[in-house]
Image (cartoon, grey):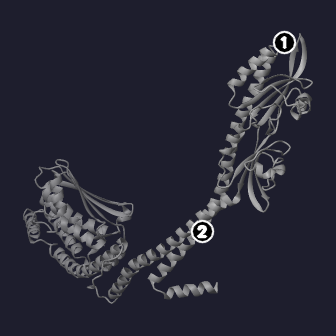
Amino acid sequence: MRLWKKIKKSLQRRSLQFTLSLTFTAVSVVVLIVVAMGYSGRFINSAEKMAINNNKNVLNQMNQNLDNYLHNMMNISNAMYYSIIKNTDFEKDGASKVTEQMKLLYDENASSLVSISIFSDDGKIIAAQPLSRLKPSVEPAEEEWFIRANEKIENLHFSTPHVENLFVNSDNIYHWVVSLSRSVEMTRAGTIVHGVVLVDMNFTGIEQICKNVDLGESGYVYIVDSNGELIYHPNQQLIYAGVFHENHKKAAVYSEGSHMETFEGQERQITVKTVGYTGWKLIGVSPTSDITSAYTQNSQFLWLVAIFAILTLVTVNMFVSSRVANPIKQLERSVRELERNNLDARIPQSGTYEIRHLAKTLQSMADNMRQLMDDIVIEQESKRKSEMDALQSQINPHFLYNTLDSIVWMIENERYDGAITMVTALARLFRISLSKGKNIITVEQELQHVENYLIIQKVRYKNKFIYNIEAEKSVLHCAVIKLSVQPLVENSIYHGLEFMDGDGEISIRAYQRDTNLVIEVEDNGPGMTKEQIKALVNGSGEPKRTRGSGIGFHNVEERIQLYFGNAYGLEVESEPDEGTLVRARLPLISVEEAEKKGEGRL
């Protein structure tokens, strides 16, 4: 734990470049070592499995070839017994007929046969091909193949390889053979007697099957019988001479499959396969040194690749870490300049894409900060000017003149009640317009201001329109910007209802929607096209005011967004001959909260 703390503290004092290089290199080296070790282990297992599978496949193929060889011997023996002996009465037909048929059978299989012969149950020769004269010293009845055939008359008996020594060979050629003997029943003058058929197959067939086997660099295959006696071995002569040794007696008792053994200090992989009918066993021998030699070469190559990869990664890590660290150092120096309020400092944009993007973002942020500071000054001036314009525009001389003229006309015509109503409404209109210099009033106050304005206009326009004001109680004490609704009503009168013959309607609604305060002004006037709506929203479609309050649509939206942000403002819905709906969307907050919000934005 203390060591880790020391390492951690030491790294904290080091540069970013050193930390990146050390970290990436350490991780890379550990990963490569783990991969190399894992690959080595897997390669050993894979090599052993491949060797086992290869040996099994080789022995299976050998077994199939040897099985074909033995089946050929059995087919020749069966042909002798069932096609020749069974169909012959040796007393009536004589041996000449049998000899002739045996010759035909021998000629068909001369490439693999050495001799075919039939013996009586007392060991006397009856017929043979191609050799027929026995050696004087030979007693067939005393031969092992003859004895085994008579002991188990129902079986076929295969001998171990030996030199053919029954017949006199004028060429003095000694043949290594494998003998197949069997007991047979022969007919002699209608009587069944026993005899023995002997088929000597050329041993070179087995040698050819075994010589073409590939079990690695020094692997080999040999064959033993059920007693462990050698039938074939590539070093058979050396074994008989005592020069070479083989563990064939012990291998003969191994079960089929793969085994590991140590013989004369050498570890070997032994694969065993049993040959059918004979009880022989194919023994495949693969020294483990053959497997490990391939593994050693592969392992050496793998570690060389790993070392080269480590050196390459160290070089690449140092290069990459410098490419990453140097631009970050430059960014760090630039940020220090920004901390000193030097917003004119230029940030170098170099390094990778992410670092360049970060530098570009920091530069943009510095530029924006400088621009925002300039904009705040301009915005303050603009807001004060807008507030002054709004106050100055609250009482338009033309509107005041027309209203007073209407009052004088009513007095002259003795319409005192109407004159009193207009004077009262005008006084209330002025009182709410002043609002003690406040820019934020309640929804209730703004709607009263609108109603006083509508009372005056309804008298002036001789009841050409009717109006309706509805407001939810929950929004009456919410904050609204002074003179934000009255200009919208004014637009409805001057541009929507002024030229109508009558039946004009203006509806004003205030309600809550989610967390917003919504105030709607709707009229049934001629409406507007999409182009007119677009021009109105952009501020380019409002005609220059010659009457009314002088506060236009665009001015109202600017003041709302100036106080509450760009998320709020005005929306217009209108179609030709369908009327116009203007919707003001503001935050649902109290007057105190609105005044604080406005001060914060100032």
Q: Earlier in the sequence, mark 1 or mark 2?
A: 2
Could you tell me which residue is drawn at 54 percent across and 88 percent down? 10
- 309 with respect to 37 (left or right): left
> Depth check: 540 or 495 in front?
540
Image quarter of residue 114: top right
Residue nearest the observer in this picture, 283 or 112: 112
Drawn side of residue 311 relative to residue 267, left or right = left
Q: Is residue 463 visible?
A: no
Badge 2 marks a residue whose secondary structure is helix
Coordinates of residue 419 in the picture (x, y in percent):
14, 65
Q: Which residue is mark 1?
A: 89
Question: Percent x, y for residue 239?
Answer: 79, 52
Q: Which residue is mark 2?
A: 34
Quarter-of-image position of residue 493: bottom left
Location of the N terminus (image quadrant): bottom right
Amino acid bearing label 1? Asp
Q: Is residue 308 above or below residue 461?
A: below
Q: Amino acid at mark 2?
A: Val
Which quadrant of the figure has residue 417?
Answer: bottom left
Of 568 and 319, nearer the camera is 319
Q: Residue furthest bottom?
A: 340
Q: Mark 1, residues whose alpha carbon is within 10 Å: few (<14), some, or many (≥20)?
A: many
Asked which secondary structure carries label 1, the reply is loop
- Looking at the image, is mark 1 or mark 2 nearer the viewer? 1
Residue contact at pointers 1 and 2, CB within 8 angstroms: no
- Looking at the image, residue 330 sits to the left or right of residue 273; the answer is left
